[in-house]
Image (cartoon, rainbow, N blue to C red):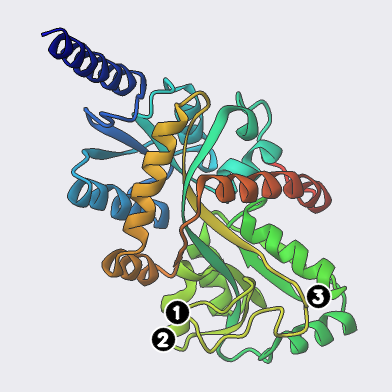
Amino acid sequence: MFRQILISTAVIASASLGFSAAAQDPAAEYPNKPVRMIVPFPPGGGTDILSRVIANKLTEVSKWTVVPDNRAGAGGTIGITEAVKAAPTGYDMVMGQKDNVVLGPYLYKNLPWNPTRDLIPVAHVAYTPIVIATAANSPYKTLADVVAAAKKNPSKITYGSPGNGTSIHLAGVMLEKASGIHLTHVPYKGSNPAMMDALAGNVDLLVSSVPSAIGQIKSGKLRAIAVTSASRSSSLPDTPTLAESGLKGFDVSTWYGLFMSKGTPSSIVTKVNLEVNKLLAMPEVREAILTQGAEPQSMSVANFDKMFQADFKQSKQIVESSGAKIE
């Protein structure tokens, strides 16, 4: 009888400990209500499409309810601000990208947040190479052609970008520094007007994300000269990298990833990271991302944080040297 009492007590104690551990771990029942995915750009753009691919698949495969919520404005920084202000419970996340998370604080005055202080990198989703292109009838066929012409006539060659201070503009700045040339930057209000002027020959070069330019490149109206990433774009496999074109070690791209507000429990961050990484291994998800001209890429929380911290530190000098600022 005494032995049975001891066994029963042990079982109760064990169950109680298990219940206590589950109650203490906020990820144990996460999520038990809808999760909001803030999209800091309008519907229909690249960030919006990518966000909905991930949100829809988390809902379908993981059986979570993830609801995209577009909060556009100020180059994506309004959506980031909303995520920073959200309660650190894991029920609000934002699809950030290099331009708004890393570059935004150096470009916009008086932002009420610092990314390394107020945000937690949760899951890297994809990166997008930047392409250097020109009109099909342009005399420039290779990077060597551009460099030779620019050295012969400094500042004469122009390049269009989707805006002052964007990662795409800064890729142009880094190209100038790495190749020892000086180009004239022509900023536009978005990728489409920059591309239209490149097609018309009003600017000599177009510096653009691959998703924005790939349609005109595939149609033969634009000629891709090089991509800025370390490896070739899956969407433009015949286009060499800048490193292959003579700028050894050149590696610049923009990236997309999920962030939560500082203070979110690490167990929830890890759970979301693992679920997103499972999706990124699925052929249909990879294909959906590749179709947009982006490259799916999973990372651990630690590796994403390491990349994010390094990019933020490096960007300060690049932005300052470019002279870019947004009032």
| Quarter assignment of residue 134 | bottom right
Please say if the residues under marks 2 and 1 sit with CB atoms less than 8 Å apart. Answer: yes
Q: Amino acid at mark 2?
A: Ser
Callout in the foreground (3, 2): 2
Determine whether, in the image, residue 245 is placed left or right of residue 213: right
* In the image, residue 109 above or below residue 147: above
Total numbered circles: 3
Q: Rate crowding at label 3 as few (under 14), some (14 to 19) or many (20 or more) other CA atoms within 10 Å.
A: some
Q: Is residue 276 visible?
A: yes
* In the image, residue 185 above or below residue 249: above
N-terminal of the pair, mark 3 or mark 1, is 3
Q: Amino acid at mark 3?
A: Lys
The percent position of residue 295, horizontal first and vertical second, equals 46, 67
Quadrant of image for the N terminus: top left
- Residue that carries the numbered disc 3 in the rendered image: 156
The percent position of residue 13, horizontal first and vertical second, equals 25, 14
- Residue that carries the numbered disc 2 in the rendered image: 219
- Residue that carries the numbered disc 1 in the rendered image: 216
Residue at screen point 41% across, 52% down: 47
Q: Amino acid at mark 1?
A: Gln
